[in-house]
Image (spheres, rainbow, N blue to C red):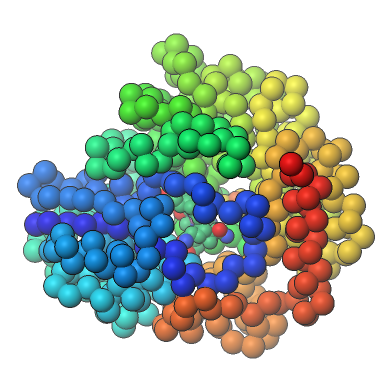
Amino acid sequence: MRVLLITLPNEGEPRDYTTPEHFSVGRLRYIPLGVLAVASGIDPQHEVRILDSASMGLSIDETLAVIDEWDPDVVGMTATIGTSYAMKRLLSGIKRAKKVVGGPHATHFSDAIRQLGADAIFQHDADRSFNAWLSSGAPDGLFRDHVDDLDTLPMPRLELLDLDDYAISDPSKVLLKNSGLRFPMYSSKGCPFHCVFCDTQERGFRFKSPVRVVDEMVHALDHGAATVHLMDDCFNVKRSRVVAICDEIRKRNLSITWSARGRAHIDLETATALREAGCERLHVGVETLDPDLLHFVNKSITLDQMRRFFSICRQVGIQTLGYFIIGFPGETTAYRKALPEMIRELGVDIPFFNILYPLPHSEIYDRWVAEGIFPKDFWSQFARDPQPGFQPPAYAPPDLHQELLDTAEWYVDEFYQP
Ligand code: B12
Ligand code: SF4
């Protein structure tokens, strides 16, 4: 069979007030790990291609034109709530091929996606189940899988992508000022914490062995990676695992620089091991520096632990990127004014600001729908009939909403003036 796996165009995304333009990933192209994982599990008798419409900036019509031209038997797309309008248009615009949807949106809203015209929907892992589905004649329906041992998955078939497309040519245009191929991979899936704003796809914590993680790093280096970024939900949930990965890197004398997404909790020994193993930066969610709000967010971390994290990272020479959210209920204007100074005191190298944006299936969204703060479950309605440029209702009154937008821009000016 001829199989085309695509990321969806960003055209028609909901209006996202959450992230100031400065941090927009618009200029960055991310190797699409989800469809790459699915493609890597497909038997060689099938012909597979990947079309990364999101990274390449293709419109919906341009994507449909590529699909028409190649005329595959199956089109598989990865969907989030953000790309559901593009998904709807493709589901109605694809003429001959079987239409398949996977990704976080498929896990949450399978009925709506079915109504919009998908033939088959895959929830959670599809590294193996998609290939099994092809082999069984590509039947219609809902499929669900969970891979227990991530080490048994095949290496990503990077030859399916033109990796030059993902290299950063002008470091001055990107937040992290790196150049070349910044290679994403994941070493674990899931996060056991319960932050109220987060749509964690998995509450458990599955992880690859240190040997497998480092094998994948080597695979990335062999394909020209300048640096590797571990896009885990929470890389450092288990201290012993982190240290074992560092030991494996050092044992192999691997010359690599890498970074990871995790939580702001570390001890000196682990941080030293990370630095010695080439880890140059950690991205962590701080969210708020107000202790009461930290409790509200359910971050399962204290301010003291965070202070220690940033001080230790400074000490060992690991750069830090801290994610902050403003707009939690009860947050004061005085706190928002004081925040830049508090961030400087904390020693965060790269602060990244967002405005609270209740995602579907996040605890805060469900709570606010139940409490009537949102008069209706607008995300479910949107999922059933996604409209272009949908504006999710703001939970804050208009003057506060405007203040949050202005404050986020002020932070960008404070920290990122040319
Ligand atoms: C990497 C990433 C990104 C990258 C995407 C890069 C890329 N092209 O892949 C970037 C930085 C661009 C990004 C942006 C955003 N992201 Co993001 N991102 C992630 C992250 C951290 C990892 C995803 C990943 O690659 N995982 C590794 C792969 C191997 O796993 P996977 O994607 O789950 O794929 C498996 C299955 O889902 C399935 N599958 C996936 N695709 C397909 C397709 C087919 C055909 C089939 C059969 C199966 C299938 O099989 C795969 C293998 O098992 C997730 C968190 C998470 N854990 O999912 C958030 C996450 C997906 N992002 C999220 C959000 C909210 C956003 C933004 C809106 C943030 C923002 N405000 O800008 C934007 C919007 C993007 C958009 N237009 O949709 C939410 C989505 C919530 C939702 N319900 O839709 C998540 C879940 C984070 C969270 N915890 O809240 N993101
Ligand atoms: S924000 Fe990070 S720590 Fe919190 S639940 Fe989500 S992935 Fe886990």
Residue 323 in the image, given as x and y percentages of width and height: 68, 48
Q: Which residue lies furthest to the right in this view?
A: 334
Query: Can see residue 22?
Result: yes
User: Which quarter of the rendering shows the N terminus?
Assistant: bottom left
Residue 203 appears in the figure: no
Residue at x 70% of width, y 82% of height: 373
* Quadrant of the rendered image containing residue 236: top right
Residue 219 position by quadrant: top left
348 lies above or below 212 = below
User: Residue drawn 41% across and 57% down?
Assistant: 57
Instruction: Decide if residue 34 is on the left or right side of residue 82.
Output: left
Relative image position of residue 238 (x, y in whole percent): 55, 35
Which residue lies most toward the bottom here? 375
Report x, y in % for residue 261.
57, 41
Q: Is residue 188 left or right of residue 295?
A: left
Residue 158 spot, x, y in % from top left:
28, 37
- Residue beneath the point at 66% across and 26% down: 318
For this rendering, which residue is in front, 403 or 40? 403
Total numbered labels: 0
Which quadrant: the C terminus?
top right
- Kindly identify the residue that appears in the image at 52 percent across and 28 percent down: 258
